[in-house]
């Protein structure tokens, strides 16, 4: 695991060098030249969903330092200063004291401005962060505040074209995990579930280094990556889960495995290619007996749906009907077809949720009904429409009169040609208001958090939880 982290983070630091304005020669704590190395770091873009800034105040309890992240030992003291105002002036980054006077330091044997070093890739941090990096096990708490909000690690800046900047929080992988676990799962859940979440968070982060590389950081702080809220969202129990799984990650066939997760499976997880595109060996469809019931519903008029399609770039004209035209191995909707006066559009896989709204269509485990009860349903057997109406579940009678219920994913019949699979279940809705009735929440790939919590309550370890939802993995 340590070799993997070093390799992945070396790539992340190399990317940082490419997208930053340019790192200077490394300077030691006293301003002398120092050798460069690649620390175990991740760069988090802060306030990803908010407007960029034109001014911010960076503070530390003791004093601030400048840090060159291309060399873990490269810290320059700011001579007891505890506050710096960073702003944009005429498209240029400026670092000054509260009176507006630019701050200077000695670096490389000469007097330079903090402004120039920040532009070259140096970061601002509390002076005790050097101790934290040198010996993480010592438990040194080093906090740098952004407009009063505390973060572990250091703060850097990426300049935008509109006279604003973005904040980038650079810190160690485990420090990052501290700020994620409680935000994503909640500290009060069973410890083994929290440990599973810690390994997943770390695995996801390390296999997504550089995801936002063109913007100057690795991951953002929103649900687009993982929700990260810094020190304010930490808790002793969730931090314990990080500490007790420190440096552990997931592997498949000797390669790092990405830790995809979400809230609720609806009873059946989905394989990667049924949600996105390419198959991934360890992301398979799994029947999930641990999933608590999570039901939801959403209603749209045909006009509202047509507007959503048009906003996403699809042209159907006034909608006439909506049909469920396919299911995947997990029984989730694989294709949804919209018939309009000017054309027909079919959405597939996760595109269904992204177009219709992921907070409204919480999963693709859903069925359609109409407020006007104007719906027709049919099963196909090798392309031949069966005349009988069919519900979303089929009941069959055995030779002894025993009734059994089949899920959609298990739809086979025996005909004159032997066993045949029922294909192309359609459910066409023609009423003016459509009702989506579903279960589960999220994309369905990897670990459902609700199920991990349920397994932990039944006594499962974090390794058992992870190996149930990620197939053929090693944890090391």
Image: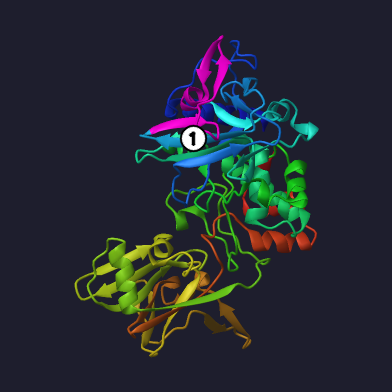
> Residue 295 placed where, x, y %?
57, 75
Horizontal placement of 134 versus 38: left or right? right
Which region of the structure is painted magenta? 92-121
Q: Residue 244: name its quadrant.
A: top right
| Front-most of residues 115 and 298 | 115
| Residue found at x 64% / y 33% | 82
| Residue found at x 37% / y 83% | 433
| Residue found at x 65% / y 17% | 29
Numbered-mark total:
1
Q: Is residue 37 located in the magenta-colored stretch of the structure?
A: no
73 to 312, vertically: above or below = above
Horizontal placement of 244 versus 201: left or right? right
> Residue 27 placed where, x, y %?
58, 15
Residue found farthest to the left: 342
212 to 50, vertically: above or below = above
Horizontal placement of 98 versus 91: left or right? right
Q: Is residue 100 located in the magenta-colored stretch of the structure?
A: yes
User: What is the basis of the colouring in this image?
Assistant: rainbow
Classed neighbour count for the residue bearing mark 1: other residues with Cα under 10 Å, few (<14), some (14–19), many (≥20)? many
The residue indicated by pointer 1 is 157
| Front-most of residues 191 and 47 | 47
The reply to whether residue 86 is in sight is yes
Looking at the rendered image, the quarter that the N terminus falls into is top right
């Amino acid at each position: 695991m340590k070799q993997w982290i070093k390799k992945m983070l070396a790539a992340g630091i190399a990317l940082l060098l490419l997208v930053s304005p340019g790192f200077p020669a490394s300077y030691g704590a006293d301003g002398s030249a120092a050798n460069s190395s690649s620390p175990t770091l991740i760069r988090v873009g802060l306030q990803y969903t908010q407007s960029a800034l034109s001014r911010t105040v960076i503070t530390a309890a003791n004093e601030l330092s400048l840090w060159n992240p291309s060399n873990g030992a490269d810290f320059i003291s700011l001579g007891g200063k505890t506050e710096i105002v960073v702003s944009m002036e005429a498209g240029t980054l400026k670092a000054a004291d509260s009176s507006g006077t630019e701050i200077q330091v000695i670096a490389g044997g000469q007097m330079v401005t903090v402004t120039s070093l920040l532009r070259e890739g140096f970061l601002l941090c509390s002076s005790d962060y050097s101790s934290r990096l040198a010996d993480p096990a010592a438990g040194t708490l080093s906090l740098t505040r952004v407009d009063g909000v505390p973060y572990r690690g250091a703060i850097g800046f990426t300049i935008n074209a509109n006279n604003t900047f973005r904040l980038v929080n650079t810190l160690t992988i485990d420090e990052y995990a501290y700020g994620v676990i409680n935000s994503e799962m909640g500290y009060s859940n069973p410890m083994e579930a929290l440990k599973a979440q810690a390994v997943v968070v770390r695995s996801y982060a390390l296999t997504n280094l550089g995801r936002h590389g063109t913007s100057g950081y690795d991951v953002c702080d929103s649900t687009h990556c993982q929700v990260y809220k810094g020190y304010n969202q930490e808790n002793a129990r969730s931090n314990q889960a990080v500490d007790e799984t420190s440096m552990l990650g997931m592997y498949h066939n000797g390669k790092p495995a990405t830790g995809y997760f979400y809230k609720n499976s609806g009873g059946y997880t989905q394989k990667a290619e049924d949600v996105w595109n390419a198959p991934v060996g360890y992301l398979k469809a799994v029947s999930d007996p641990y999933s608590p019931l999570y039901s939801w519903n959403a209603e749209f008029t045909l006009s509202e749906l047509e507007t959503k399609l048009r906003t996403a770039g699809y042209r159907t004209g006034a909608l006439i009907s909506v049909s469920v035209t396919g299911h995947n191995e997990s029984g989730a909707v694989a294709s949804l077809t919209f018939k309009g006066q000017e054309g027909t559009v079919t959405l597939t896989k996760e595109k269904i949720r992204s177009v219709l709204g992921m907070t409204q269509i919480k999963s693709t485990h859903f069925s359609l009904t109409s407020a006007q009860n104007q719906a027709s349903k049919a099963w196909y057997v090798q392309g031949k429409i069966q005349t009988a109406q069919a519900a979303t579940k089929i009941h069959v009678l055995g030779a002894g009169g025993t009734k059994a219920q089949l899920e959609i994913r298990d739809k086979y019949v025996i005909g004159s040609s032997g066993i045949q699979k029922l294909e192309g279940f359609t459910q066409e809705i023609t009423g003016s208001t459509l009702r989506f009735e579903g279960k589960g929440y999220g994309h369905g790939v990897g670990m459902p958090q609700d199920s991990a919590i349920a397994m932990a309550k039944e006594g499962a370890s974090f390794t058992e939880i992870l190996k149930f939802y990620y197939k053929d993995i090693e944890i090391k």
